[in-house]
Image (cartoon, helix red, strand yellow):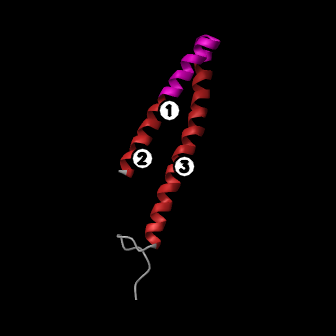
């Protein structure tokens, strides 16, 4: 269930990135007018998306790595824990 939620969050984030960049381009074009406004809007939207969703993906990776490390230290099912005996 946890993997489904994480995958769903990642999918929503990818869609949001595209929508933010497109929306920023349209907003820039309407505010500044023309192609220059569109380029400025897309650039601003891209920077915003990279920072915001980069932090989100970083948090997801930290949680996944923490789980994997705890499973390894506890002698999880994949056998990478300390040898018994």
Alpha carbon distance from label 2 to label 1: 16 Å
Of callouts 1 and 3, the N-terminal one: 1
Alpha carbon distance from label 3 to label 2: 13 Å
Classed neighbour count for the residue bearing mark 2: other residues with Cα under 10 Å, few (<14), some (14–19), many (≥20):
few
Residue at point 51% right, 46% down? 57
The spot of residue 56 in percent (x, y) is: 54, 44
Q: Please check the rendered image and state whether residue 78 is part of the magenta-colored stretch, yes or no.
A: no
Classed neighbour count for the residue bearing mark 1: other residues with Cα under 10 Å, few (<14), some (14–19), many (≥20):
some
- Give yes or no for contact between labels 3 and 2 (Cβ–Cβ under 8 Å): no
- Judging depth in this view, the residue of 54 and 60 nearest the camera is 60
What residue sits right under mark 1 in the picture? 17
Identity of the residue furthest to the bottom in this view: 85
Q: Quadrant of the C terminus?
A: bottom left
What residue sits right under mark 2 in the picture? 6
The spot of residue 20 in percent (x, y) is: 52, 27
Vertical order, 57 against 76 (above or below): above
- Give yes or no for contact between labels 1 and 3 (Cβ–Cβ under 8 Å): no
What residue sits right under mark 3 in the picture? 58
* Residue extent of the magenta highlight: 19-37
Is 11 on the left or on the right of 43, as rendered?
left
**Residue 28 appears in which quarter of the rendering?**
top right
Vertical order, 29 against 61 (above or below): above
The spot of residue 69 in percent (x, y) is: 48, 66
For label 2, the SS is helix
**Residue 78 appears in which quarter of the rendering?**
bottom left
The prevailing secondary structure element of the residues shown in magenta is helix
């Amino acid at each position: 269930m946890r993997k489904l939620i994480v995958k769903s969050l990642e999918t929503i984030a990818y869609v949001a990135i595209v929508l933010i960049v497109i929306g920023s381009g349209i907003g820039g074009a309407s505010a500044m007018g023309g192609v220059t406004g569109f380029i400025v809007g897309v650039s601003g939207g891209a920077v915003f998306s990279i920072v915001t969703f980069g932090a989100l993906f970083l948090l997801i990776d930290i949680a996944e790595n923490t789980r994997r490390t705890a499973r390894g230290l506890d002698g999880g099912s994949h056998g990478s824990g300390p040898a018994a005996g």
